[in-house]
Amino acid sequence: MIECRAIKMLQDASSWLDEKPYKEIFDGRIHEKVSPKRTHGIVQGRIVSLLSAWGGGRGDIVVEWRVYLNRTTTLVPDVSFMSDERLRALSEKERETPPLAPELVVEIRSPDNRKRNILRKEALYLAHGAAAVLDIDPQARTIRVIDANGEVTLGPGDTFSHPTFPGLILAVDDVFAPLNRHRESV
């Protein structure tokens, strides 16, 4: 019954799903994306910059890219990376709204995010093709890395690297540098 209702929601959603605030549908429910604030935007911009320096010639780095994981689930990651190899396997229409998760998904926490929704979305991304999910917490200045092998939390002085993304090294300190700069200047 929940699946039928979710399918109907997705079929009827074309007129409002992508209006701001964006909506996501999973587990038979509509979830409004938390409205981003300054801190979220700064970290999101920084991630895009760091990923673009590494992966601009390897694939697409996209902000707020809607993906359809199945007939009942659609999510909007804060930042995504999808390789050229994976993109080539998709039709032009599918490239606009992929039917799978990007290889790298970045979600940036806002104070109003619900922990259970964060965990559920991470599981959905991994189940539908993501190699890694980065759960970035600007308040704690940490990055939780979730992949098929489990999870690890990175803090100051740590770096993220992953065998699926050769050459990509994200230093936690670099990710939060703009926030620290603003903190020091106030």
Image: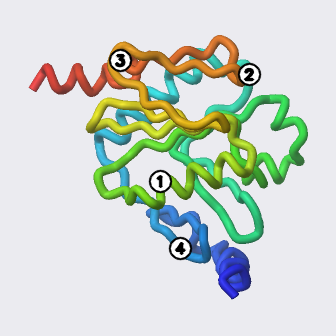
Q: State the CA–CA distance, disc 3 to disc 2.
A: 24 Å
Say what amino acid the circle numbered 2 marks.
Arg
Residue under the point 73% across and 50% down: 128
* Mark 4 neighbour class, 10 Å CA radius: few under 14, some 14 to 19, many 20 or more: some
| Earlier-in-chain disc, 1 versus 3 | 1
Pointer 4: what residue? 30
* Badge number at residue 118: 1
Q: Is residue 134 visible?
A: yes
| Earlier-in-chain disc, 4 versus 1 | 4
Q: State the CA–CA distance, disc 2 to disc 1.
A: 28 Å
Q: State the CA–CA distance, disc 1 to disc 3.
A: 23 Å
Side (left or right) of 91 relative to 158: right
In the picture as drawn, the residue positioned furthest to the bottom comes out as: 1
Side (left or right) of 155 relative to 73: left
Q: State the CA–CA distance, disc 4 to disc 3.
A: 35 Å
Nearer mark to the viewer, of 2 and 1: 1
In the picture, residue 35 is in which quadrant? bottom left
Q: State the CA–CA distance, disc 4 to disc 1.
A: 14 Å
Nearer mark to the viewer, of 1 and 3: 1
* Badge number at residue 58: 2
